[in-house]
Image: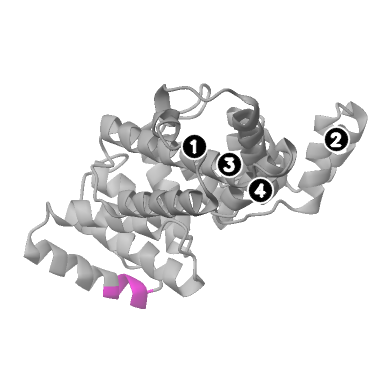
């Protein structure tokens, strides 16, 4: 699973898309087809109702169990999400029609950027990225030397220098750095970003991903626990084991509940519901017993 981008970056991306929608002509093709069929001059009430309907559609889609090991199914599901997301941008833009284009775009960007869980970069990394963006080579080199090995690896990953990032993450991971363990696992995850093909140059070793996800999961890392559920369910890097997959999905759900993180709980529930339909009642019960055993051992005795 890819690392969550910063709140600032997400907002910038959302703003870019929103501005593009604000100045581009609306067509009848692709994801915007449904929008073009709406009333030409919708009222504020119409738009609010449309946004509420889109929110319900998004919620229903998230709750629907799906075969997350099938690339075709996942790609189709992602397209549906994209369709709904684009329509929401259009609706928010129209709500701000009395504002300037820029103001309307910012309204849409703000409304949609807040839907994701915010993760901010450390100041040192933000300073380095700012130097890179303004092409200040001298300042960037000086700032890079002051970053921690993990931060250097993180920046290498963002610049798509995956082999460099991995060479920096691995020693840290072997020394017990949980974040580095998760990143080694994610960089080698064959199921890169929902079963889609990984970016060019990305490592592709499911067995290595499983090894380091398991290490990080034992240290309570929630992302790695969810990833283990994916690996066990799809038989990537390890033998397919729905009992263990159900167990790890349940553990990550429990962690999200404790930390009040609910940004993607429905997606995990949908995955667990899908594999539960393939399990016997005895297997589900065995998984729940393993769940108790694993929790009591603080994720050390989970098999």
Q: CA distance from mark 3 to mark 4?
A: 10 Å
Question: Which label's residue is closer to the chain start, 2 or 4?
Answer: 4
- Residue 242 visible to the viewer: no
Residue 219 location in percent, x, y?
A: 48, 64
Marked residue nearer the N-terminal end (3 or 2):
3
Tell me the element at label 4. Answer: helix
How far apart in space, not on screen, are marks 1 and 4 (Cα)?
14 Å
Residue tagged by mark 2?
131
Depth check: give the residue in front, 205 or 199. 199
Give the spatial CA distance, label 1 vs label 3: 13 Å
The residue where tag 1 is placed is 86
Q: Nearer the viewer, mark 1 or mark 3?
A: 3
| CA separation in Å, label 2 and label 4 | 29 Å
Q: Is residue 268 above or below residue 21?
A: below
The residue singled out by tag 4 in the image is 107
Asked which secondary structure carries label 2, the reply is helix
Query: Does any portion of residue 133 appear in the rendered image?
Result: yes
Q: Secondary structure at mark 3?
A: helix
Residue 158, image quadrant: top right
- Dot in front, 2 or 4: 4
Task: In the displayed orientation, state which residue is furthest to the bottom.
Answer: 296
Seen at 89% across and 29% down, the residue is 136
Pointer 2 and pointer 4: residues touching (CB < 8 Å)?
no
- In this rendering, the answer to whether 288 lies above or below 55 is below
Magenta region: 292-297
Residue identified by numbered label 3: 94
Q: How many marks?
A: 4
Residue 164 in the image: above or below residue 290: above
Dot 3 or dot 4, earlier in sequence: 3
Q: Is residue 35 magenta?
A: no
């Amino acid at each position: 699973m890819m690392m969550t981008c910063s709140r600032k970056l997400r907002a910038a991306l959302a703003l870019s898309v929103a501005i593009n929608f604000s100045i581009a002509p609306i067509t009848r093709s692709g994801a915007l087809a449904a929008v073009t069929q709406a009333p030409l001059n919708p009222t504020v009430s119409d738009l609010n109702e449309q946004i509420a309907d889109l929110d319900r559609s998004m919620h229903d889609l998230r709750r629907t169990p799906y075969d997350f090991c099938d690339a075709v199914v996942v790609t189709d599901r992602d397209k549906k999400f994209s369709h709904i997301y684009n329509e929401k941008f259009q609706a928010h833009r129209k709500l701000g029609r009395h504002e300037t284009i820029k103001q309307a775009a910012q309204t849409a960007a703000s409304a949609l950027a807040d839907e994701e869980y915010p993760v901010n970069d450390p100041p040192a990394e933000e300073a380095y990225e700012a130097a890179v963006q303004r092409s200040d080579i001298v300042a960037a080199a000086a700032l890079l030397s002051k970053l921690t090995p993990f931060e250097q690896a993180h920046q290498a990953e963002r610049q798509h220098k995956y082999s460099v990032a991995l060479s920096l993450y691995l020693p840290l991971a072997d020394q017990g750095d949980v974040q580095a363990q998760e990143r080694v696992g994610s960089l080698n995850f064959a199921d890169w970003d929902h079963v889609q093909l990984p970016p060019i140059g990305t490592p592709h070793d499911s067995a290595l991903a499983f090894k380091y996800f398991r290490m990080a999961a034992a240290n309570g890392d929630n992302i790695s626990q969810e990833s283990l559920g994916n690996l066990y369910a799809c038989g990537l890097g390890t033998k397919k084991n729905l009992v263990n997959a159900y167990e790890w999905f349940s553990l990550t759900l429990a962690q999200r509940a404790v930390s009040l993180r609910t940004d993607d709980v429905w997606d995990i529930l949908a995955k667990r519901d899908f594999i539960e339909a393939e399990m016997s009642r005895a297997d589900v019960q065995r998984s729940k017993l393993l769940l108790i055993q694993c929790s009591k051992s603080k994720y050390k005795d989970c098999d």
